[in-house]
Image: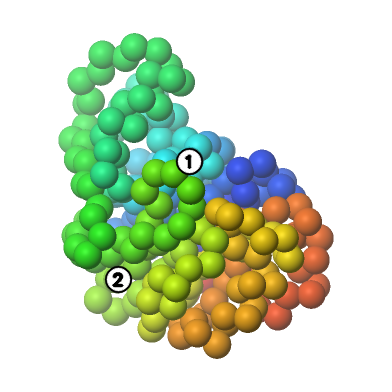
Amino acid sequence: MRVKILGSGDAFGSGGRFNTCFHLTSGDTRILVDCGASSMVALRHFGVDPDSIDAIVISHFHGDHYGGLPFFLLYSQYESKRKRPLTLAGPPGLRERVTQALKACFGDLRTDWRFPLEFVELHPGMVSRVEGLAVEPIPVEHGTGPTFALRIDDGDKLFAYSSDTTWTDALPAVAQDADLFLVECYAYDEQLPNHCDWRTLSRHLPDLHARRIMLTHMSAPMLARLDEVSIETAYDGLEIGL
């Protein structure tokens, strides 16, 4: 499995970073994990063909994590005239939320998709197969609406992602035995109800048993203090072999 960080930023583009979007390659399968509002720009910037993507897995319904879907879908429909199937996976209500986002961005589209489009709802306690990959959602704490940390296993390597969350006792289970654990760390020492901070996270590092841990989704104040952080931090364009 290979991971390319297309977007490691927060909702506000702090540090000039794109919204959350991770590109995973396993054999011939290519998926995106989250597709924030700026993700089509990130795909273009880093030379990733949207038509090469087999599936998009969404962690939660905030615009910096799924707001790029309307643009991705409209590009596929009208610009590239995609023929290959596309799978969208995410929390319950995914189809309705994507429909709402399309309408909000582009009005009342009565579109018969020219390509097969499948929706897969993820449910806690269940492992779903998405284009041959095992996707396990684990609920975390990020305010209203379902928010899932994700464990994605190709049978050889395991990618784990915290999604956006304050510290929760679920995170050690998310990280367990992962080859890479991407964990959001929005703040440095400001404790927030819906996001993690470095001061808190650093105390819990001994509980996170992943082979490699990397911070993502960092605010401007957090980015300004990266020289005080003792573990790796993600950045746009970073490529990682697992």
Indicate which disc residue 116 carries.
Answer: none
Render colour scheme: rainbow
Q: Mark 2 or 1, which is nearer the eye?
A: 1
Of pointers 2 and 1, the one earlier in the residue sequence: 1
Measured Cα–Cα span from mark 2 to mark 1: 24 Å
- Place of residue 82 in the rendered image (x, y in percent of width and height, measured from the top left): 29, 33
Indicate which disc residue 153 carries.
Answer: 2
- The quadrant in which residue 228 appears is bottom right
The 10 Å Cα crowd at callout 1, few under 14, some 14 to 19, many 20 or more, is some
Query: Image point 26% across, 60% down: which residue?
Result: 124
- Place of residue 122 in the rendered image (x, y in percent of width and height, measured from the top left): 25, 53
The 10 Å Cα crowd at callout 2, few under 14, some 14 to 19, many 20 or more, is many
- Report helix, strand or loop for mark 1: loop
Nearer to us in this view, 211 or 142:
142
Residue type pointed to by label 2 = Asp
- The quadrant in which residue 135 appears is bottom left
Query: Image point 44% across, 29% down: which residue?
Result: 71
Q: Are marks 2 and 1 in contact (CB under 8 Å)?
A: no
Q: Quadrant of the C terminus?
A: bottom left
Q: Is residue 33 above or below residue 199?
A: above
Indicate which disc residue 62 carries.
Answer: 1
Q: Is residue 152 above or below residue 70?
A: below
Residue type pointed to by label 1 = His
